[in-house]
Amino acid sequence: MSEATDMGLLLNSIQEFVVATGGSFSVWSGAYHEVTVHGLDRDRFPIFCANDDTAPIRIIDVGGEVVMKCRKPTLLEALRTASTYLTFPPPLGDQAVLQVVDDERGVLLDRMCMALLTGCSFHEVPPSEDHISQALARNGIRRRKEYQAMTGRADDDVDIIDVLGYYAKSEGVELVAVGLDGTRTVLASVDGDAG
C-alpha cells in the first residue's frame, strides 16, 4: 500500500471514531505533526502526561473535555498512533522496574522496560536479554531516534533512564528504580509526578 493510501485509511478510521462518539479531530503540521481528537470518554481514556508537552501521546483535560494529542515526526506516524490509541487505549497501571547494580548507573531492565525501549508489547519481549532479536534491536534504535527528535537531544546526551522515563510517561507506565540498598524510587508515575 502507498503512504497516501495508508493516510487515507487512517483518516477514515479516526473520522469513523469521532462520528460514532460525537467528537471531532484536527491535524496540525509544522516542525512535528500532531493529531488532536476532542470529546473522548473520560473512563476509556484517563488523563495522563497532561503536563508533558513533548510526550508523543497525551490525554488532557481542556475545559472539562477529554482531548488526545498524538505528536510524531511524520504525519503518517501521527495518524497511525492516533488511530491505534483510539482503538486500543494505552494500558494504565503497569509498572516497569530497573534495578541499579553499581554506582556508575549500571542497571538491569525488566521486560516492561525493554517493551518501553523497543515500542513492543510486553509479550513480544523475550524473558532473557540473551535472546533479543535484530528486529527488537532495530526498534530500540528507532525509538531512541524518535526520542531524540521529540526532545532535541544529541546522541551523546541520551541517557537510557531519560528515554525510559519519557516513554513510561507517554504510555502510562510507572517507572521504578530499585537502588543498591533496595530503596524504591518512582522515576515516572502514571499521573506525571515523580519522586
Image: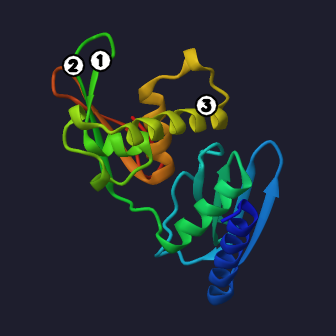
Q: Residues within 10 Å of mark 1 (few under 14, many from 20)?
A: few
Q: Residue 148: which numbered mark, if any?
A: 3
Which picture quadrant has residue 101?
A: top left
Give the color scheme: rainbow, by chain, secondary structure or one colour. Answer: rainbow
Label 2: how many Cα within 10 Å (few below 14, some 14–19, many 20+): some
Q: Residue at x 54, y 51 (%)?
A: 49
Q: Which amino acid lies under the numbered mark 2 shown in the image of this protein?
A: Val
- 33 with respect to 166 (left or right): right
Identified by mark 3, the residue type is Gln
Residue 155 occupies which quadrant of the picture?
top right
Q: Is residue 72 above or below residue 156?
A: below
Label 3, secondary structure: give it: helix
Q: Which residue is mark 1?
A: 106
The residue under label 2 is: 101
Front residue of 100/190: it is 100
Instruction: Using a 10 Å C-alpha cutoff, classify the residue at mark 3 as few (fewer than 14 neighbours), some (14 to 19) or many (20 or more).
Output: some
Q: Earlier in the sequence, mark 2 or mark 1?
A: 2
Do tag 2 and tag 1 residues touch (Cβ < 8 Å)?
yes
Q: Residue at x 16, y 21 (%)?
A: 181
Viewport quadrant of the N terminus:
bottom right
Q: Residue shown at 61%/62% (left/top)?
A: 80
